Amino acid sequence: MNSQDYIRLEEKYGAHNYHPLPVVLSRGEGVYVWDVEGKKYYDFLSAYSAVNQGHCHPKIVKALEEQAKTLALTSRAFYNDVLGEYEKYVTEYFGYDKVLP
């Protein structure tokens, strides 16, 4: 499929909350992303700052793989053994009273 095929699929079946750029990304590495036709771009949007560490950094990929072997994701309907320590660290580091990750 090419970019227009993917865009048509999303237009037909997806709920529209905003209008994305007419670029269909298929992979990323470091500061770059590639579209389905193989064109390379700088990722200046960085997933709205949630992925500003780049794409597919080997240390991050390794950490994700290791975590996936233990527990991939939990709903906030449950407590877990990591979130409280993380919240403590972040609030102390930034001087916050509370944090909502």
Image (spheres, grey):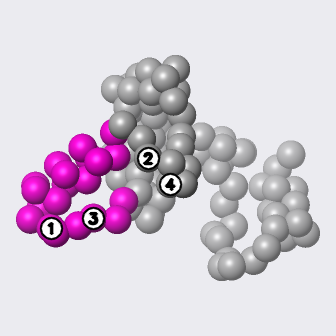
Q: Residue placed farthest to the front in the image?
A: 78
User: Which stretch is magenta?
Assistant: 82-101
Residue 75 placement (x, y as % from top left): 55, 50
User: Pointer 3 and pointer 1: residues touching (CB < 8 Å)?
Assistant: yes
28 relative to 62, above or below: below
User: Image check: 68 left or right of 18?
Assistant: left
Classify residue 17 by image quadrant.
bottom right
Which comes sooner in the sequence, label 1 or label 2? 2
Counting residues from the start of the chain, the first of labels 3 and 4 encountered is 4
Q: At 10% from the left edge and 55% from the top edge, which residue is drawn?
A: 93
Label for residue 76?
4
Q: Give me the C-alpha separation between circle 3 and circle 1.
A: 7 Å
Residue type, mark 2 in image = Tyr
Q: Amino acid at mark 3?
A: Val
Q: Residue at x 44, y 65 (%)?
A: 48
- Check disc 1 and report the residue beneath it: 96
- Position of residue 38 in the picture relative to residue 31 (left or right): right
Tell me the residue at 42%/41% (across/down): 80
Q: Secondary structure at mark 2?
A: loop
Mark 4 element type: loop
State the image quarter where residue 4 is shown. Answer: bottom right
- In the image, farthest residue toward the right: 12
Image coordinates of residue 57 in percent, x first then y, are: 38, 32
Q: From the image, tell me which residue sits under label 3.
A: 99
Tell me the distance, in whole angstroms, between the alpha carbons under discs 4 and 1.
21 Å
Q: Nearer the viewer, mark 3 or mark 2?
A: 2
Of badges 3 and 4, nearer the viewer stands 4
Q: Amino acid at mark 1?
A: Tyr
Q: Which quadrant would the C terminus be assigned to in this image?
A: bottom left
Q: Nearer the viewer, residue 67 or 23?
A: 67
C-beta proximity under 8 Å, tags 4 and 1: no
